[in-house]
Amino acid sequence: MSEQRQPLLSIIVIAYDMQRQALNTLRSLASDYQQDVDAADYEVIAVENRSARTLDAQAIAELPGDFRYFLRDEPGVSPAAAINFAFAQARGRYIGLLIDGARMVTPGVIKHTLMAFRMNEQALVAVPGFHLGEHDQQFHLTNGYSEASEIGLLQSVDWPRNGYGLFDIACWSPGNARGALQPFMECNCLFASAECFREIGQADERFQCPGGGMLNLDVYRRLAMLPATQLVVLAGEGSFHQLHGGVTTSESGRREQILQRQQEEYLAIRGQPYHSPTLEPLLLGQFKWPATRFLELSAEWAQKRFQRFANDGRDPFADEQIKRESLRALGHVADH
């Protein structure tokens, strides 16, 4: 760990049994990969629950930047306790959270995240999600996609020197399957102030399904629905999921049962079914050439959604009204 000033941003990466994938993710957060940032402005906190395939601590220590690695013995199957452990280590005023450590990112994520916080300290920064490969990885067996296939794809774009080449070998994630201009169901690479995370109680450890169940969705929605937060989408950046046998991101005959159990757990905790926060985002960033095809698709799908909602007389961003009413109740918005 480098002896530098207190970082502005702490990025939490949670890993379990994903040695290759998590190291790629950490590599994508290194200061020689992230563009136009001061290495002293951020730290990366990698927390791993012990498995048969743990990360190489020396390899992490050799990454450029401020990395801290913690290996934990976790008796449960949820990452919730590991996340809260990581929050206790974080020194930054702002926090980034990657609950699934298999999600590597593009080179402009940290630069634009810090830009968003300079604009608005109450920003909730969401990075659009993608899956490596031509198809959603939950159908990887059907489509003949394997870790070997993925390693070949990553080598083909030379991603450590060409991070935006990841767009050339990816497809949309189911969490934002209709692109960056429609409400996200979840976000696997998000950033908010440490105060906002404290306000929602950080990770709710009642989520005990394998992989955390709907914990990630819960964190995203609760941050998004805080009265003062402003959703900022880094539309020209991405987080890219690598195949690793994830609970809901790999093909399994028990997938529907798993999803049903997760939904039941969420309902028991929150008292109502989950729905995506329908908020109008502020778009921030720059578009490199490989990302423009996804912008085109996003615009096409957004036009169809807007037209459908207009035809039905519905508000496409209905949760904005709920947030305005909450702010008004707190005395932060004048009545008109």
Image: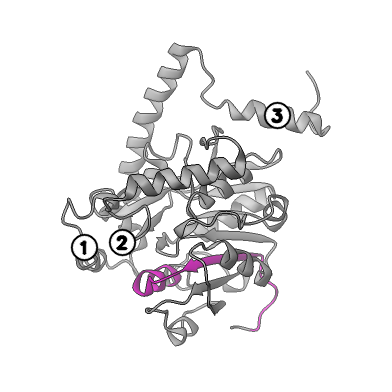
Q: Amino acid at mark 3?
A: Arg
What residue is disc 2 on?
Answer: 243
Q: Indicate left or right for 285 with 173 as reference.
A: right
Q: Amino acid at mark 2?
A: Leu
Q: Are marks 1 and 2 in contact (CB under 8 Å)?
A: yes
**Gap in Å between the C-alphas at discs 1 and 2?**
7 Å
In the displayed structure, would residue 312 be above or below residue 56?
above
Q: Nearer the viewer, residue 155 or 72?
A: 72
In the displayed structure, would residue 37 be above or below residue 313?
below
Q: Position of residue 76 (x, y in %)?
A: 51, 67
On residue 146, which mark appears? 1
Q: Does 107 lie within the magenta span?
A: no
Colour scheme? one colour
* Residue range highlighted in magenta: 3-26
**Gap in Å between the C-alphas at discs 3 and 2?**
40 Å
Q: Indicate left or right for 266 with 17 as reference.
A: right
Q: Name the front one of labels 1 and 3.
A: 1
Give the SS element for disc 1.
loop
Neighbor class of circle 2 (other Cα within 10 Å; few <14, some 14-19, many 20+) is many
Specify which label sits upstream in the sequence, 1 or 3: 1
In the displayed structure, would residue 189 be above or below residue 42?
above
In the picture, the quarter occupied by the N terminus is: bottom right
On residue 324, which mark appears? 3
**Gap in Å between the C-alphas at discs 1 and 3?**
46 Å
Q: Indicate left or right for 154 with 142 as reference.
A: right
Give the SS element for disc 2.
loop
Q: Position of residue 57 (x, y in %)?
A: 47, 84
Neighbor class of circle 1 (other Cα within 10 Å; few <14, some 14-19, many 20+) is some
Residue depicted at 46% across the width and 47% down the height: 262
